[in-house]
Structures are given as structure tokens and as C-alpha cells.
Amino acid sequence: MIDQYTSLDVAVFGLYFLILLVTGYIFNRRAKNTNDYFLGGNSMSIWTVSISVLATSQSAATFLGGPDQGYRGDLTYLSTNIAGFIAAFFVAKFLLPRFYALKAFTVYELLGSRFGDNAKYQAGLVYLFGRLFASGARLFMAAIAVAMILFGNVEPSSVAIAICIITVVGFAYTVYGGIRTVIYSDVVQCVIYVGAAVLVLFHLMNAIPLSTGEIINVLQTPAIDQASKLTFIDFSVDFTSSGVFNIWSILTGFVLLNIAAFGLDQDVTQRMLTCKDSKSATKALVSSIMMGIPIVLIFVCIGLLLFIFYQRPDIMAQAAGGAPIPEFEGQTVTIFMYYVLTSLPNGIKAVVTIGIVAAALSTLNSGLNSMSSVAVQDIYRGWFKKGIEVAEDKLVRVGRVTMGIVAIALGCVALLCYYWQQYTDTPLLAFALSVMVFSYSGLLGIYFTALFSERGTPGSIVTALIVGFAIPMLMQPYVQSLYLPEAWQFDLAFTWQLVVGTAVSTLICLSRKNSTQKITGKL
């Protein structure tokens, strides 16, 4: 598909890569110590952090997953922001003040202060394992787009090459400057990919021969016996994966998912810890959620319009004027890229392609520094070098080496996610969210125990983390087929898997009494 680009497109690409070089040079000043490398010296502004949190939460998952969700489904994904605000209140009230009181580099230091250092190491390892899957899933989605650009298909070899390209570029862009570079680059990439999405939306609106009111009417009644694609809140009681975005799932599993994402996942929380205090971090978090609503709406609306563009030939025939009526050929996950490469005019096509590359880089950069910080602070410094003074410049060097190892591991997991998603045929947004459940279940259980009780022991924490991972794993359809007769196999949405896993993990932690006092707000 790369041969479809013209000299105008190449010129736009050149401008973008020039911007990358300039911003990379400006942002990549060498960090002098671990506080600078992992926390940006606690001097990052609220608006840059909020945009970085937004880019970290969205990136390639929203760029491809949003249109995929709109094309297949409706607007119910937007209602998950209800859970986001509830979770933000919880994180601001119970977690951020404690992190700042501890002057924590990672969120798992809080567990160390409550249950001892071993709990911190164990939680850090679980995070690293879970974040490899979560960031690997997003890297896989970014690779889909890049593979479509370069090769016009999503064959395994094409996706593998795309993964390698994104990984190498992202690592080179991030390795020296640390979290400060990641945050500033997130701002640049976010502006680019949101601008690209707005261009696509306007182009689609002009391509469909209907007024805005007529488009709304078509989406309200897309076909006989088909539900409205403008449904915002789904009150149906459905515990299966098809009901993952109903209100009951949002008020339970999605609240837990967002608490874990905002407060227990170093990938997002690290950005908030770069602010000067917990109040600034809270403002950054709430601002990112508010900014995310219209941005996600844009991407989902692109999918809704693509539904009309490809699934309503009776409407598109009115605009064809004798030209071929648009037809979609390929896998559903490629719907957005297929439109970009086959229907957008030159120039705009290049801008949107750049937006995809920007989302891809934001996807990778968001995980590299956070996993490196946990590996260095909680594992290397706290475990292997416990009680030994390690020079700051050496810790920074270890962080850079660790980042390289993480980049390689992410690439491998991204390729695994390719086969995983292909096997389950899960919509991209649901897939990106569901892979987080494996590490979040146990972490939520032990944090709830630590925050609101005086119970729990190092032994019960290990058990809770293992069980929290095992429960959702045993509920996966491809795992159920290994131990359950076909008649007994079931489909349970990942949000309810998280509810069950968290509940069991919490009970396991509470089953053992610890003489240590519970955490207070005056740490």
C-alpha cells in the first residue's frame, strides 16, 4: 500500500520526521539522577501531565479500536467515563496523598510500607508481567496500522516487521531523557493524532450524501431488527462479552478497572507522580478524563460513519455519480486503515498516516519508562541491591539497559497478541482492556486490604496475586476448552471476571491477620 503515496505525501512525512528529530533533541536532555529520569524532578505542569495521561490511556487502542467499536457497535463505550470519574475520586482520596507522603518512585512502595519489602517486589513483578500484556496489546494494534501502510495486509510477517520498526524507533526516542521526554512527546503525538482524526471525520461527513440530521436518523434505525447505533447507556442485564459495556458492568468492573489503571498501574500513575503534589496530580487526572470524552467520541463517530459508508450502498449510490460504490474487503479490525488507504485524498492520507505513527509511538513510550522504573526501583535497587549504596548515575544506566530489555519483551508479547486476538475475534477496544484483568485482580485485592483493614500477611499477598491472575485465565474460552466439557463452558465479560478475581483476592488477603497498623493518610 505504500506505493499509493505521492510526492505530496512524502513531503508531509518528511516534515513530521523533522519534527520528531527536533523535539527528540530538545526533550532528550540527559537525566542526572533517578528522580529526574523516573519522576521528572516532580516539576511537570498539570496540563502536560493531563495530556500525557490521556495519550497513555488512549493512543493506538483508541485510534483503531474506536472506529472498530463504532463500526461493530454503538456509543455505549463512552458511558465508561462514568466509571472513570468514580475511580478518579477514589484514587484522589485514598491513593495519591499516600504516594506523595511516601515520596514514592513507584506505586508499589506503598505496599512495602504496609506489608514489608517482599510485598513490594511481588507486586512489582506482577505489574511487569501484566503491563507486558497490556502494552503489548496496544503495540500489536499500532503494528496493524503500520503493516497496512507498508504492506497492505496484516499477515504475521507484515505485523512482525511493523512491530520491530515501532519498537526500535520508540526506544531510540525515549532511552536518554526518561519520563520528561515521554510526557512531552506524548503531548506532541496526541495533538497530531487527534488532528488527524478530525480530518478523517470531516472527510467522511462530506463523502456521505446526507445531512447531519439524516445521518442521525440512519444510525438510529440502521436496519430492520437492529438496535440503534446511537445507544449511549445500555440497561440490559447481560453478563457475557456482548454486554461488556452495559451500565451494570460499568458501575462494577469498569470502576475497578479504572481504579487499577489510574492508581495501581505504574504506567499511568507515574505520570501523575511527576506533578509537585497530590492536588496537582488530581487536577491532571480529572482533566485527562474530561478531555478524553470528546476525543473518544470523534473516533467512535468515525466508526459509525464508516458503517454507513460501507454497509449502506443504497445511500452511497446517491453520491457515486457512476463511480464504484465503496466496498470493504478485509478483516474488521482493519476497517479504519482500509478507508485511510483507499479513500482519502493525497496529503490528508499522509497526515492521517502520521497520526497513526504518532499513536504507535505514544503506545510504546508509555510503557517503556514505567516498566523500567519498577524494574530498577523495586526489583534491582530494592531486591538485588538491598542494603547496598548504588550511585545515581549507575541506576540511570541500569534503567536504560532495562528499557532495552523491556522493548524486546514488548515486541514478543505484541506478536503473541496478534494470534490471541485473531483466535478470539474480540473487538480491539475490548481486547485492549481485557488483557489488563490478569494483573489487576490480585493488585486490587491487596490494595483494598492494605487501605481499609489491619489484616493481610506477606504469605496471603502472594496467594492473592497468584489467584487473582489464575481466575480470569481459567475463564478464557481457549483455556476452558482444556478442562471443561463443551456443555459447561461459559462466556463471562472481562469486567465480571475482574469483579470475581478482585473479590476472591480480597477475601484471601483478609483471611490472615497482620499486627501491622493499617495505612493512614498521615504516612
Image (cartoon, helix red, strand yellow):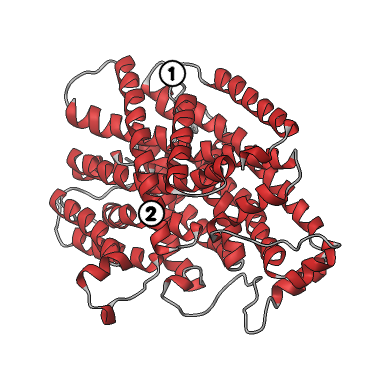
Give the percent coordinates (x, y) of residue 12.
71, 31
Give the percent coordinates (x, y) of residue 124.
27, 41
Q: Mark 2 points at which residue?
A: 419
- Distance from label 2 to label 1 (Cα)? 38 Å
Give the percent coordinates (x, y) of residue 67.
61, 57
Q: How many tags in the picture?
A: 2
| Picture quarter with the C terminus | top left
Q: What residue type is labelled 1?
A: Ala
Q: Which amino acid does label 2 sit on?
A: Tyr
Q: What element carries label 1?
A: loop
For label 1, the crowd category at 10 Å Cα-Cα, with few meaning under 14, some 14 to 19 and many 20 or more, is: many
Q: Is mark 2 on a helix, strand or loop?
A: helix
| Picture quarter with the N terminus | top right
Residue 219 location, quadrant = bottom right
Q: Is residue 242 above or below residue 285?
A: below
The disc at residue 227 is none
Q: Nearer the viewer, residue 315 or 193?
A: 315
Q: Is residue 165 above or below residue 492?
A: above
The disc at residue 31 is 1
Residue 475 location, quadrant = bottom left
For label 2, the crowd category at 10 Å Cα-Cα, with few meaning under 14, some 14 to 19 and many 20 or more, is: few
What's the residue at 56%, 52% (across, down)?
64
Give the percent coordinates (x, y) of residue 373.
35, 32
Badge nearest the viewer, 2 or 1:
2
- 111 sits left or right of 310 in the view: left
> Can the viewer see residue 98 in this picture?
yes
**Mark positioned earlier in the residue sequence (2 or 1):** 1
What's the residue at 51%, 47% (across, down)?
144
